[in-house]
Image (spheres, helix red, strand yellow):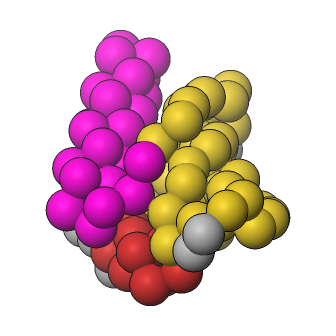
Amino acid sequence: SSDVCSSDLQDKFIDELYRVADLRAVRIISIQSGEIISSEELQAQVIDVNLEADYISLLNFIRDILDGERLVSLEKFSAEYVAGRIIACELSFKIFSTEP
């Protein structure tokens, strides 16, 4: 069913977020997945991510996710300075997949 496919896509994307965060020295605070929006050919889902990183790590993390193997858009972005060189950041990625 398409539900299985969607949750598989979501799980793979979340795995990718953790993998890239580890690679780029980004600390993920939380990840929350939104509802799946389906149209004729396409499914989309928003994944909200809270994280902390320095500027360069954050830049590389976002670049890696957007340049990954699937269609992803950055829907929302907010950042605030925490301490030292660390930025707290809220990101909303939208991931897309085709219906099976």
Taking 55 as reference, is 79 above or below it? above
Describe residue 28's horizontal placement relative to residue 52 as left or right.
Answer: left
- Residue 54, given in percent of the width and then of the height, sits at 50, 72
Quadrant in the picture for the C terminus? top left
Is residue 28 positioned above or below 54 on the image?
above
In the depicted view, which residue is nearer to us: 59 or 73?
Answer: 59
Q: State the image coordinates of residue 50 (x, y, percent, origin top left).
A: 62, 44
State the residue in front, 40 or 44: 44
Residue 59 at x, y percent in the picture: 48, 82
| Main secondary-structure element of the magenta-colored stretch | helix
- Left or right of residue 31: residue 92: right
Q: Is residue 50 magenta?
A: no
Return the residue nearer the eye: 14 or 72. 14
Q: Residue at x 35, y 49 (%)?
A: 17
Residue 98's spot in the image, x, y percent?
A: 41, 50
Q: Quarter of the image holding residue 23?
A: bottom left
Is 10 part of what is drawn in magenta?
yes
> Residue at the spot x=40%, y=75% of the render?
57
Q: Seen in the image, is 77 located left or right of residue 49? A: right
Residue extent of the magenta highlight: 1-27
Residue at horizontal 34 percent and vertical 16 percent from the top: 4
Whether residue 34 appears in this view of the structure is yes
- The quadrant where residue 60 appears: bottom left
Residue 98 visible in this rendered orientation of the protein: no
Residue in view at x 23 percent, y 53 percent:
22
